[in-house]
Image: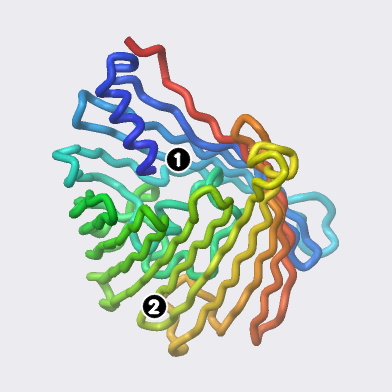
Amino acid sequence: MATLSLTALALARSGVAQDTPLLSGGVGFFTTTNAGQTSYSPMIEPLIAAPIGSHILVESRAILLENFAPNGGNNPGYDHSHFVSLTYLQGDYLVSRRLTIVGGSFLIPFNTYNDRLSEIWIGNFQGGPLTAGLGTEGTGTGTGGMLSGSAISRHKYSISYNAYFSSHAGNQYFASNRSVGGRSSLYLPDHRLEIGLSYNRVLQGTHENFYGGHLWWEPANSGFELRSEFSRGHHAQGFWIETAYRTPAFGGFDSIVGRIEPVFRMNQSFRRDTLFSDSLPLVNTQRADFGIDYNLPHNTRILTSYSRQFASTGNSNIWQTGIVYRFLFPAWKGK
């Protein structure tokens, strides 16, 4: 989202595409096999970023999902369900290079998965980690206002921040809880290393605090990625760590071999008590995700993975495959 916002604002400031909205997003088809039952899910996630002048940007993302799953029991055929919703809808006012004011329905910036990796064309796995919903209040969105930007920017390091307030909203498209929180990150460009801390406090119902920390490391020109998070709530906590690698040794990243990307993710969630007010499993759970992605030309990716989940309620195997196409183009020809 941040990259697309900067791109749209850059276009708005250029003479090539003055005030031209960008249409982006992903189209995917996914299959999931769990306990021998296979479901099929075609999905579209369109995104629009529309600059208004050189300081205002309106952006939104939607989701259109169809799901086909086998009927239960001895009934032949498949059940069908569909889901259509706006993921977020926000307006950004670029005050300066150090401050952007955001208003509307926005993705909660708690840790990194929710606002950086949840798009189907970005994540290395089809599904999210076990702790993806911890600290993002289940809906993943807030309705209110947010301040974000770069507090300090130096040659050797930079510090970015997000601070937000969300009100309660019961609308089916913009559901959110009353909460306050934020995230701060330190980035070391020479090492391509980012370390950050997050905080969220729910201000309605039973007040709860959520704490998070993340670490990303992507060494330059190595093809290696490491991403990790730790989240702690009042009733549960957990972590995930993910690695991915593409080798440049056989003709570069765009060669047949260089497009192959083995990925691995380890997840664990722990109950701190028997109360349930979050989206984590009801018992201590650990899951290992193994995958091989293939990065085709023209922004198309094939995702394959096998997951083994362990819990006191039973162990399970999960097989997932999918293909995703990322699109990005201007809504019309710029001036």
**Mark 2 highlights which residue?**
232
The quadrant of the rendering that contains the C terminus is top left
The spot of residue 94 in percent (x, y) is: 19, 38
Q: In this view, does 252 lie to the left or right of 209?
A: right
Q: In this view, does 118 lie to the left or right of 36?
A: left
Query: Are the residues tagged 2 and 1 within 8 Å (C-beta)?
Result: no
Q: In this view, does 3 lie to the left or right of 161?
A: right
In the image, farthest residue toward the left: 95
Q: How are the residues colored?
A: rainbow
- Tell me which residue sits at (44%, 89%) in the image: 273
| Mark 1: amino acid | Ala
The spot of residue 32 in percent (x, y) is: 71, 56
Looking at the picture, does residue 247 appear above or below residue 89?
below
Per the image, label 2 sits on a secondary structure element best described as: strand
- Tell me which residue sits at (56%, 52%) in the image: 222
| Mark 2: amino acid | Arg
The spot of residue 261 in percent (x, y) is: 67, 51
Instruction: Indicate the quadrant where residue 332 lies.
Output: top left
N-terminal-most mark, 2 or 1: 1
The answer to whether residue 31 shows anywhere in this view is no
The spot of residue 284 in percent (x, y) is: 56, 84
- Tell me which residue sits at (40%, 12%) in the image: 333
**Mark 1 highlights which residue?**
62
Q: How many marks?
A: 2
- Tell me which residue sits at (28%, 56%) in the image: 157
CA separation in Å, label 2 and label 1: 29 Å
Q: Is residue 267 left or right of residue 13?
A: right
The quadrant of the rendering that contains the N terminus is top left
